[in-house]
């Protein structure tokens, strides 16, 4: 599994590889990202159970984060993030076809994506 985060303003991506997608694991990963990049005012996510749990609601409330979820079965309502997910999947698949490990593919993707000018 991967936790994909995209800053809506700067378009800066964070991708975290994980073997658990529980609320507790997700909160821990977000806490680590927010410790480096700062606390967001708004977080938009899908309706995964890790984002709709009582623990996640408490995390957002405690940290002053407004949490919005996309409409169920309509991921297009979070277009920027969905475009990034599509770009990520296609790129990592191509990179791995060159016999790279998933960790190497992730590093190559992030370095390339982060150094490519946004239009």
Image (cartoon, grey):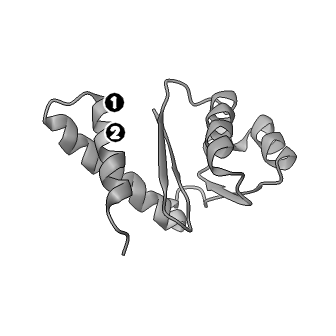
Q: Decide if residue 5 is on the left or right side of residue 25.
A: left
Q: Is residue 102 above or below residue 35?
A: above
Q: Identify the secondary structure beneath mark 2.
A: helix
Task: Find out whether the residues at labels 2 and 1 contact each other: C-beta distance under 8 Å.
Answer: yes
User: Residue 59, labelled with which disc?
Assistant: none
Q: Which residue is mark 1?
A: 103
Q: Residue at x 21, y 35 (%)?
A: 96
Q: Residue at x 55, y 25 (%)?
A: 20
Q: How far from the left and from the top, in percent, is residue 33?
A: 61, 42
Q: Judge left or right: residue 61 versus residue 27.
A: right
Quadrant containing the N terminus is top left
Classify residue 103 by image quadrant.
top left
Given residues 82 and 6, the one toward you in this image is 6
Q: How many marks?
A: 2
How dense is the environment of label 1, judged by Cα within 10 Å: few (below 14), some, or many (20 and up)? few
Direction bottom: furthest residue: 119
Direction right: furthest residue? 62
Instruction: Tell me where residue 27 sits by quadrant.
Output: top right
Residue ID at (79%, 35%): 55
Q: Which residue is mark 2?
A: 107
**Taking the image as drawn, is residue 76 in sight?**
no
Q: Is 3 left, or right, of 56 in this rendering?
A: left
Quadrant where the C terminus lies?
Answer: bottom left
- Whether residue 29 sits left or right of residue 110 in the image: it is right
Instruction: Give 67 or 114, whichever is nearer the viewer.
Output: 114
Q: Secondary structure at mark 1?
A: helix
Question: Residue 34 at what x, y percent from top left?
Answer: 66, 45
- Residue at the extreme top: 19
């Amino acid at each position: 599994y991967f936790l994909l985060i995209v800053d809506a303003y700067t378009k800066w991506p964070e991708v975290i590889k994980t073997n658990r997608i529980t609320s507790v694991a997700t909160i821990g990963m977000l806490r680590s990202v927010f410790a480096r990049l700062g606390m967001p005012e708004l977080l938009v996510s899908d309706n995964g159970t890790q984002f709709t749990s009582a623990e996640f609601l408490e995390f957002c409330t405690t940290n002053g984060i407004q949490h919005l979820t996309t409409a169920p079965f309509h991921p297009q309502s979070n277009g920027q993030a969905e475009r990034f997910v599509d770009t990520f999947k296609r790129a990592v698949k191509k990179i791995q076809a060159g016999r790279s490990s998933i960790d190497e593919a992730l590093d190559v993707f992030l370095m390339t994506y982060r150094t490519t000018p946004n239009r």
